[in-house]
Image (spheres, rainbow, N blue to C red):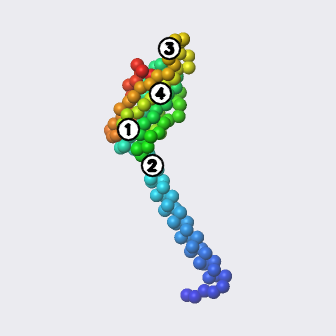
């Protein structure tokens, strides 16, 4: 069917807009799929860090994309500090700081944790309580 004038122009525009919207939706879905975190310990773990000395900690190491990353400082008021949303594997360096360290005692602490690439669960426990 041939159309002329206004109907032809708007009909063509609608088709182009629909095609563009579909392309954007597909591209967005691809980006979202590529940005997903590791699940069920497939290539990295979230860390549960044993802390008895430090008031706050951060961790640095390789993430699920093999990028060197560091978490922000995280308060560690309890015996275990959970670094949720950060997926590590390999050797992870953990730095701790104690706000009220006694005079003559270093307020800074450091420990390492060897994190497996894969395991059955999402969390890996770093038993660093004697160090952090």
| Mark 1 / mark 2, whichever is N-terminal | 2
State which mark lies toward you, 4 or 1.
4
Q: Is residue 44 above or below residue 102?
A: below
The residue that disc 4 covers is: 95
Q: Does residue 116 appear in the picture of this structure?
A: yes
Mark number displayed over residue 124: none
Residues at marks 1 and 2, CA–CA distance in whole angstroms:
16 Å
Mark number displayed over residue 105: 3
Residues at marks 3 and 4, CA–CA distance in whole angstroms:
16 Å
Q: Position of residue 83 (x, y in %)?
A: 47, 33
> Which residue is painted at 50% across and 35% down in the image?
71
The residue that disc 2 covers is: 36
- Mark 2: few/some/many CA within 10 Å (<14, 14-19, 20+): few
The residue that disc 1 covers is: 89
Quadrant in the picture for the N terminus: bottom right
> Which residue is painted at 66% across and 85% down in the image?
5
């Amino acid at each position: 069917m041939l159309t002329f004038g206004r109907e032809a122009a708007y009909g063509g525009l609608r088709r182009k807009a629909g095609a563009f919207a579909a392309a954007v939706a597909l591209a967005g879905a691809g980006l979202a799929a590529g940005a997903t975190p590791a699940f069920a310990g497939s290539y990295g773990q979230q860390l549960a860090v044993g802390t008895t000395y430090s008031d706050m900690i951060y961790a640095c190491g390789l993430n699920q994309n093999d990028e060197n990353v560091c978490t922000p400082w995280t308060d560690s008021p309890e015996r275990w500090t959970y670094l949720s949303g950060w997926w590590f594997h390999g050797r992870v360096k953990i730095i701790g700081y104690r706000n009220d360290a006694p005079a003559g005692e270093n307020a800074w602490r450091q420990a390492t944790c060897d994190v497996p690439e894969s395991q059955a669960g999402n969390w890996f426990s770093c038993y660093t309580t004697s160090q952090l």
